């Protein structure tokens, strides 16, 4: 059972367009992290949000943690080809021996 | 600034062979872990360690062994490789080994692509 569902699984857009991807769950998380992974490389952390309703901005990327701490969104403004990659969300767990639950990812392709 | 180093980058094994995937970090991190990444499955935790001499099972531990004799190294052993272990393997580390550190940044290696024939 996947704790975190990411949608859409695949998104292709033109350079300059805006996009939003989502990370949803029925579980409550202590934190929510977003990573970006490029082909042949490991994921790299973009941001961590820890407070319900929190919004963080990283240049053209805006991350929001849901009020109930069950979901998150990533919005990219004026997408660039360098934004192409697999975006993974990871929720911090309160219990068990797994520290983070990862979603399957949002594959984003920005066409020049 | 090496970070997390994984070797080898690519490996092909025959069913039944054994091998060790190496992982080393130079950041003095207490927490180290191994994930596998499969298409349509996302990242799944295999084993993890909160410090030297301490290891524990993750979500998918069967067929894999680990040990942590030093802070820097966390090798993953496949005792008898099976085709189901074909995957991309990532080692990751973070500063703290405490259970309250779920919001800490994970540093990932660049992965090992393993094929078992």
Image (tube, coloured by chain):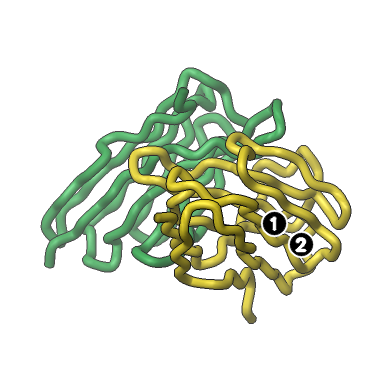
Chain colours: A green, B yellow
Q: Which residue is mark 1?
A: B94
Label 1 resides on the chain identified as B
Mark 1 to mark 2: distance in Å? Answer: 5 Å
Between residue B74 and residue A80, name the one nearer to us: B74
- Place of residue A91 in the rendered image (x, y in percent of width and height, measured from the top left): 55, 36
Residue B12: image location, x then y, percent: 44, 65
Question: Are there few (<14), some (14-19), or many (20+) residues within 10 Å of tag 2?
Answer: some
Residue extending farthest right: B53
Q: Is residue A56 visible?
A: no
The chain identifier of the residue carrying mark 2 reads B
Q: Which structural element holds mark 2?
A: loop
**Does residue B98 appear left or right of residue A99 in this picture?**
right
Report which residue position mark 2 lands on. B29
The residue that appears at 56% across and 58% down in the rendered structure is: B17
| SS class, disc 1 | strand
Q: Determine crowd level at label 1: few under 14, some 14-19, many 20+ residues with C-alpha closer than 10 A.
A: many
Q: Are marks 1 and 2 in contact (CB under 8 Å)?
A: yes
Say yes or no: labels 1 and 2 on the same chain: yes
Q: Is residue A17 left or right of A88 when viewed as pictured?
A: left
Q: Residue placed at 48% from the left, 52% from the top?
A: B15
């Amino acid at each position: 059972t996947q704790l975190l569902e990411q949608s859409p699984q695949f998104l292709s857009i033109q350079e300059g367009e805006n996009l939003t991807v989502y990370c949803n769950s029925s579980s409550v998380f202590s934190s929510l992290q977003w990573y970006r992974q490029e082909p042949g490389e490991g994921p790299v952390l973009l941001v961590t949000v820890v407070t319900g309703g929190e919004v963080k901005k990283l240049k053209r990327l805006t991350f929001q943690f849901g009020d109930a701490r069950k979901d998150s969104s990533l919005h990219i403004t004026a997408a660039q080809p360098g934004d192409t990659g697999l975006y993974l969300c990871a929720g911090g767990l309160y219990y068990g021996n797994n520290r983070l639950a990862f979603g399957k990812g949002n594959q984003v392709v920005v066409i020049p | 600034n090496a970070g997390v180093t994984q070797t080898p980058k690519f490996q092909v094994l025959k069913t039944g062979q054994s091998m060790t995937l190496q992982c080393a970090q130079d950041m003095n991190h207490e927490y180290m872990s191994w994930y596998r990444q499969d298409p349509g499955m996302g990242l799944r935790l295999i084993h993890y360690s909160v410090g030297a001499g301490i290891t524990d099972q993750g979500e998918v531990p069967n067929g894999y062994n680990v040990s942590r004799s030093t802070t820097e190294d966390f090798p993953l052993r496949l005792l008898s490789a099976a085709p189901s272990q074909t995957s991309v393997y990532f080692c990751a580390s973070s500063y703290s080994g405490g259970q309250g550190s779920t919001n800490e940044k994970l540093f990932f290696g660049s992965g090992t692509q393993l094929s078992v024939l």
